[in-house]
Image (spheres, rainbow, N blue to C red):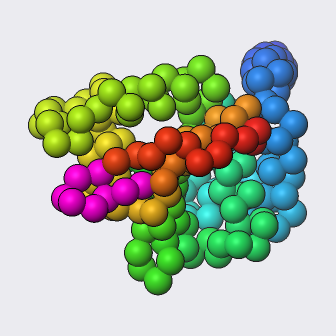
Amino acid sequence: MKSWARDLLINLATNHIDRFLTSVTPWELDQLKVAFEKGLLREESGFLFLPDGRRWSLMTVNKEYITHIAIYSELVGSGQWHPENIKLEHEYLDLVIFERGTPVIAVEVKRSETEAAKLVKGLAAVDPLNLPELDRGNDPIRKMKSLLKLKPKEFWVVSPERRWTFDVDSSNGTLKLREPNKSEAA
């Protein structure tokens, strides 16, 4: 009986992994490899351990988590940023990069270019001077509030296929995301 259950679980896990891998891009796979090689990510007993001590079950890792790991790995793996300068899931943003204690880059990750473009479009429609108090379920408003609080120099929206980079202008007590100064493939 135990053998049957084990075989079933292995089959379920294999099917899950096979379906999952069809959606992972070459950039994400390359960055996952870098993350493991540099010790930024490790697997133990069915869990992925993140640099900040959190762990994700391999069976429940979703597509967006892979993109989180990929952009984190790219930032640290390039040598430009140290792990201690990057906070994961900070102030309702997926990554925030600090320089001498000050937020310089805020990053929001989306699992697809379609979702990322929807956020970019939604942010363009948000009036930072007229934000509703309730923001649950309204991603553009929640992100705008976070950006107003942190006031980073840049804001990135990253998907596996594309990256939008905005300059953040927080002068005059408001916040304006300037047109993307570059849009590049991830």
When asked about the image quadrant of residue 60, the answer is top right
Asked if residue 41 shows in the view, the reply is: no
- Classify 108 as above or below 153: above
Q: Residue sitting at 73 percent across and 58 percent down?
A: 73
Segment tinted magenta in the rendering: 168-175
Q: Quadrant of the C terminus?
A: top right
Q: Reply above or below: 160 against 31.
A: above
Q: Quadrant of residue 54?
A: bottom right
Q: Quadrant of the N terminus?
A: top right
User: Relative to 109, is 170 on the left or the right?
Assistant: left
Q: Is residue 22 visible?
A: yes
In the rendered image, residue 91, in percent from the top left (x then y), is placed at: 35, 54
Q: Is residue 80 above or below residue 130?
A: below
Q: Is residue 45 left or right of residue 104?
A: right
Using the image, determine if residue 77 lies above or below residue 178.
below
User: Which residue corresponds to the image point at 69% horizontal and 62% vertical from the top-left?
Assistant: 75
Magenta-colored stretch includes residue 56 = no
**Per the image, is 171 magenta?**
yes
